[in-house]
Amino acid sequence: MLEYANLKALAVVVSEGGFDRAAKVLHITQSAVSQRIRQLEEKVGQSLLIRSNPVVATPTGKRLLRHYSQVQLLESELRAEMDADDPNHPTTVRIAVNADSLATWFLPALAGMFSRHAWLLELIVDDESYTHHLLKNGEAVGCVTTTEVPMAGCSSEFLGTMEYLCVATPEFAARYFGEPRDSLSLSDTRLFNGISQAQLAKAPAVVFSTKDKLHEKFLAQYFNMTPGQWWQHTIPSSESFLEAINLSLGYGLVGHLQAKPLIDQGILIELTPERRMRVPLFWQHWNIKAKQTTLVYRALAATAQHNLLHQE
């Protein structure tokens, strides 16, 4: 039988990145934290931490963290059933989500529900193709992901599709992709006859992060380009990413929820109306009977129905 005080020590050491910070959070000495981790490692017969800076969990450590997170969620639900949601002991629901969803439809989906319950929301933001790893490692109880096949012990539910449009300001497009025709305004989406590989090689792109491969897939699929054949700005902030495009720093792929209002206002134009990228999104969560994950999915699904695409 595992000692849950020891499991809690493991979780806090990993979340805080070290033994000293964990000791302050747990209100015990650093040697007491080390002793709890040592007892746990002796119990399972394996090392649970990589003593780096910051400290990280080994694969076995991650499995124990996932188990501990699941038990925490079930205990929170039991406490809620016995005493109703207790504001003095609020449940923390950890969810992994991609930045584009967070910037648009995600928070409005959950705001009302978290306000009604004594729950705290802890978000971990990562690329949508990586969020399922956070679920697998036990760092989140659910995630918005592009991975359809459910991981072991998890369920996967389709939320909808985010469509990405290749956009730029009219000024940027005129500078790098040709001059506008006299009969068309700068805001007209038919402004440019076509975009060549040579033009894309010189026009700087705006990319969200090094993990984000959407731009790379777009250029490979439609223009037969490979990494290294274009220039790019890397801006890992959803707001600043869009601002960089609006400031004519470069062109980029923007989700339809953010792109279409700006196109309607004439701030941006779509460079390739017939060439868009569609990214299906799924909600994956642990297969445990927890009220929190059930209600979170219902809230996400209801909002996604009105914001994401559901037809081919």
Image (cartoon, helix red, strand yellow):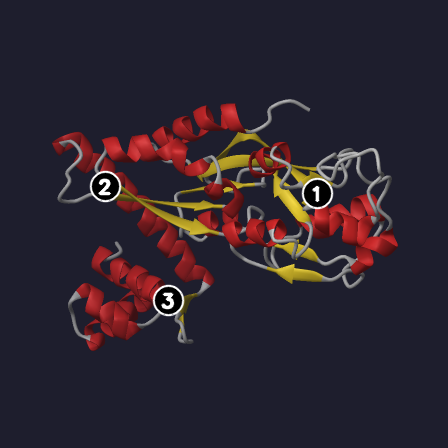
Could you tell me how far apart the alpha carbons at marks 1 and 2 are, in whole angstroms?
A: 46 Å
Which amino acid type is marked by label 2?
A: Glu
Mark 2 or mark 3, which is nearer the start of the sequence? Answer: 3
- Residue 248 x %, y %: 65, 53
- SS for tag 3? loop
As drawn, is 69 to the left or to the right of 230? Answer: left
- Residue 297 x %, y %: 41, 30
Q: Indicate the quadrant containing the N terminus: top left, top right, bottom left or bottom right.
A: bottom left
The quadrant holding residue 56 is bottom left
- Asked if the residues shown at circle 1 and circle 2 are in contact, with their CB atoms under 8 angstroms apart, the answer is no
Q: Residue at x 26, y 68 (%)?
A: 22
For label 2, count other residues whose C-alpha is less than 10 Å away and answer few (under 14), some (14-19) or many (20+): some
In this view, the mark in front (3 or 2):
2
Q: Residue at x 16, y 44 (%)?
A: 89
224 relative to 43, above or below:
above
Mark 2 or mark 1, which is nearer the start of the sequence? Answer: 2
81 relative to 216, above or below:
above
Q: Which residue is mark 3?
A: 45
The quadrant holding residue 5 is bottom left
Could you tell me how far apart the alpha carbons at marks 3 and 1 are, in whole angstroms?
A: 53 Å
